[in-house]
Structure formats: structure tokens, C-alpha cells
Amino acid sequence: MSDDQEVKIRGPLVPVKGIPLSEHIANHYSNVLAFCPDPSDLLIATYPKAGTTWVQETVDLLLHNGNIEICKRASTPIRMPFLENSKRPGIPSGIDLLKTMDPPRVIKTHLPFQLIPKGFWENKCKVIYVARNAKDNLVSYFHFDQMNVTHPDPGPWEHYVQKFMRGQVAWGSWYDHVKSYWEEREKRNILYLFYEDMKENPQREVERIMRYLDLSLPDDVISRIVELTSFENMKENPMANYSFMPRCIFDQSLCTFMRKGQVGDWMNHFTPEQSAEFDEDYQKKMKHVYIPFRSHF
Ligand code: PPS
């Protein structure tokens, strides 16, 4: 069977321990669960569309002293394997790729806390979690689900808002995801970042990541990393902008992966009525925990 034939267009979501995942990921989850990381491995965990690629690029540059040529050695998912992803055209499964790499490795995941292989916690791996305010995250996911033709069709905007609120999208409920890592962050030494903080003051956030990784880089290198990881520069970087993904997975003629990179784009999508309904539902779902999200500056 060729790689192309393995890709199911608009495939269904299949629950794993109650979390809806793409079928190809759900079918291979037992391999993921059996994965045991090295204590030196770093996990970058996010709900989809929260700023994963941005933090991945930042971390890779920090680990390579801001050297962009080294960071262009391969595309993002080859440099930093996507833990739960199965084999895709031109990209081995995350697990197979990890077997070819020596620790320390940087690993991406969208799995909620309860689906993470427990070796990450037993081995006290460092974990960076990035969260993005719910409304912008939803807007970004809506566009992504149009462009990622392996995900279920997002349908019209007003239906998608309801699906997101019910957690009926790949990797499940945004609310449960952000809460699960928030509640564990101190016990597990998780660095919990916000997309909005990175937009507001990228220098400060790059330095936070640097300190978490026990690195110490001079100011000019930090400034260079901030510049190299700007939205504009990453949009033009073929190793970070997912232009390498075949059209049978990401059809970027529908929407580019590097779409807008803004805080507050939700205001261009939600009607006042939708926003009010969303906020009321949000208060109920988030009432037991305060996470300092900002949906505009
Ligand atoms: S994925 O598919 O889950 O890994 O996507 P992810 O990388 O988490 O999120 C993609 C969104 O992040 C935006 N992005 C950035 N914003 C600001 N600065 C930089 N450097 C940057 N890189 C990626 C990207 O544009 C997506 O957001 P939207 O709102 O759709 O533009």
C-alpha cells in the first residue's frame, strides 16, 4: 500500500479513554502508551493550535545557540517527533522516529494529561505546556480543520462553535485539556506558558523557557531568537511553515498553516450572541479553577 492510500480523507474520530482522536492515532495508541522516554527528553504539550510550532522552533533555537542553519536541518516533525502521530506520507510515526534518535529529544504532543505515557512523569521529564485563550484557539482550529483534510469536516462556523464547546473535535475538550495540565503544573514541574504572553513580550517568554531548560545565552542571541521566531519569519521558513506536508493531509490552498498569528481574531468571527453564549458556558466549565487567560490586550 502506498503512503497516499493510507491517508483517510475526512476520517472519523475514535474515542480513546473518552477522548476523541483521529482514527489513525487511536489505532496506534497502545504503541504510544508503551513508549518510555529518557529523563533528559523534553515534552512540549499543547491543545492543538495553541502555539506548539512557535514554542518548538524557539526551543530548537535555544538548544542550538540561535543557529538558524542548524534549525533548518529538517522539518519540524522530523526534528521534534509528534509522539502520537502514526506514519504519514514522508514522515515516520512519532514512535518510530524516536527510536532512531538519541536522547535528549524534544517531543511534541497534543494528548491530554491523562493519556500521556506515565514514563514521562516517572522519569521526571521536563514539560512545557502552552495554552491559548479559548476563542482564538477555536478560531484557529476551525480554519485548521478546513485545511487538515484528514480531520472531520468542520462544517459551518456556527456548528463548529457548538462542537468545540462540547469537546467534539480531535483531542477533545479544550476546557479539560488546559485544566488538566494547570492542576498538575506545580507537582510535575510543568512550565505553563500562554500564547498571549508570548505575543505581548516574546523576549521575556524566551528567557523563561531558557531558564527552565537550564541554559544561559547572551542577550544578542535571545534577541536573534525572538526575531527568527516572529510570525512573519516563521511563515517564510519552509522547515517550520508546514509547506512540506503533502496536500493529501494539509491542503494549504484552503488556508495556510501560518494563518494570522494574532490575539483577538475571535472578534472577527463571533457574533455578539455567540460570544455571550460562549462566555456563559465558559464560566460554568471553568468555575472551579482560575487560569489567567487573556482574550485581548
Ligand atoms: S498545531 O497544528 O496544533 O501544531 O498548531 P500550533 O502550532 O499549535 O498553532 C498554530 C497557530 O499558531 C500560530 N503561530 C504563530 N503565532 C505567532 N507567532 C508565531 N511565530 C507563530 N507560529 C505559529 C499559527 O499562525 C496558528 O494560529 P492562527 O491563529 O491560526 O494564525
Image (tube, grey):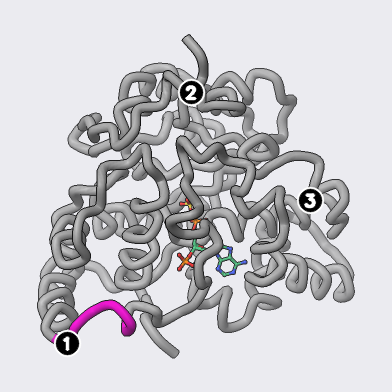
Residue 66: image quadrant is: bottom right
Quickly name the residue at label 3: 63
Furthest residue in direction bottom, as rendered: 297
Q: Residue at x 14, y 61 (%)?
A: 159
> Is 209 included in the stretch rendered in magenta?
no
| Secondary structure found at label 1 | helix
Q: Residue at x 86, y 75 (%)?
A: 219
The type of residue carrying mark 1 is Pro
Please tell me which residue lies in front, 198 or 161: 161
The reply to whether residue 125 is visible in this rendering is: no
Look at the image and give the residue range highlighted in magenta: 267-272
| Secondary structure found at label 2 | helix
Q: Residue at x 15, y 67 (%)?
A: 158
Vertical order, 52 against 1 (above or below): below
- Mark 3 closeness class: few <14, some 14–19, many ≥20 residues within 10 Å: some
Q: Residue at x 74, y 72 (%)?
A: 226
Q: Position of residue 210 (x, y in %)?
A: 72, 62
Give the mark nearest the N terminus, 2 or 3: 2
Residue 26: image quadrant is: top left
Q: Is mark 2 within 8 Å of ligand 1?
A: no
The type of residue carrying mark 2 is Asp
